Image (cartoon, helix red, strand yellow):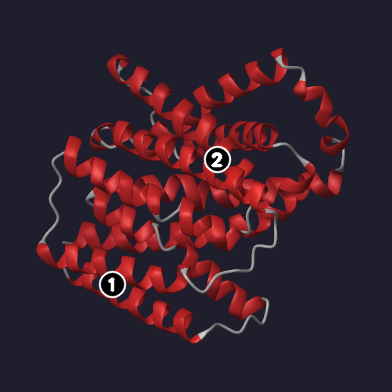
Amino acid sequence: MTNSIFGIVIALISTATWAICSIIFKHLGERLEPVGMTMLKTIFSSILLFIIAILSQTSLNIETDTIIKIALSGILGIAVGDSLFFASLNRLSPLTLSLILFVLPDLFAGIFGLIFLEEMPPILSWVGIFTILVGLAFLIFPINSDNSSSKTKITGLIFALLSIIFTAYSSVLIKPILVTTSVITVTIYRMFFAAIVLLIYALFSKKIFNWKETLTDTNYNLKLAGTFSLVTIGGFWLSLVAIKYCKLIIASSIMSLEPLFILIFMILFNHYKPKNKECLGIIVTVIGILLICAS
């Protein structure tokens, strides 16, 4: 019971972090290709987490038979999934993208958890999950702020849907390993294998030479470093902590609330005036969270 509540709180913090970083990445991604952004983020995150592991004296030992699953999870979920995420983010608004990319993959991950991991949450959790979906539906339908062309939107949607598949499946691969292995250790190895694949791709395709001007901009690099730090600890690491302490479908449902957090941040910091349906969506979604907590 205590572990589940802890996992839910961590999932909420992780979701809020992703919402903030999505808004920031929308602006930073205008100067760097999706693969380049993912590669830099992954390399930076690997180094940062390695330093944290050393300082906290976390064991980096890992069983040999789990290496392949961790590597595959990192390559699919980070190298491929995150590159597709940044590609879709360049074509869609953060709020529009988050409605697709953060609601569906987490719910898919939860469904995969039911199928492959046989995780069955209590009835009240199911009611809460359904309530969250209803609340998110109210948030989805009023949105028409994305002014990009239809062709660009379709391409962005395709990239987003592909990212969903890779992200959801990578969560299923990693869930059983988290039972016996430290979260930070798993995250480091996932980042490491993803970084290797991305670096090899950038070198062989010679794309890395196209990023020279951007990567020598000190101010831009500082913004990248700050955002990468935030998304590494608050996004990746805490999301795995939430998955470890919650049933996958519950943690996934909570982490699908990023659109709600983006809307709240837009109201607080951009003076956005929400429509009546959006206000109703917020209320219904919060009720869904409370139902899951009560379960």
- Determine the secondary structure under disc 2: helix
**Labels 1, 2: front one:** 2
Tags 1 and 2 touching, CB below 8 Å = no
Other-residue count near label 1 (Cα within 10 Å), few / some / many at <14 / 14–19 / ≥20: many
Residue bearing mark 1: 288
Q: Is residue 288 above or below residue 24?
A: below
Which residue corresponds to the image point at 39% horizontal and 69% vertical from the top-left? 137
Q: Position of residue 242 (x, y in %)?
A: 33, 52
Front residue (pair 6, 174): 174
Mark 2 Cα shell of 10 Å, populated few (<14), some (14-19), many (≥20): many
Q: Position of residue 2 (x, y in %)?
A: 20, 62
The residue sitting at 47% across, 37% down in the picture is 162
* Viewer-closest of 219 and 18: 18
Name the N-terminal-most of marks 1 and 2.
2
Pick the quarter of the image with the N terminus: bottom left
Q: Nearer the viewer, residue 187 or 163?
A: 163
**Which label is found at residue 159?**
2
Q: Secondary structure at mark 1?
A: helix
Answer with the quarter of the image where residue 164 lies. top left
Residue at position x 37%, y 45% in the image: 240
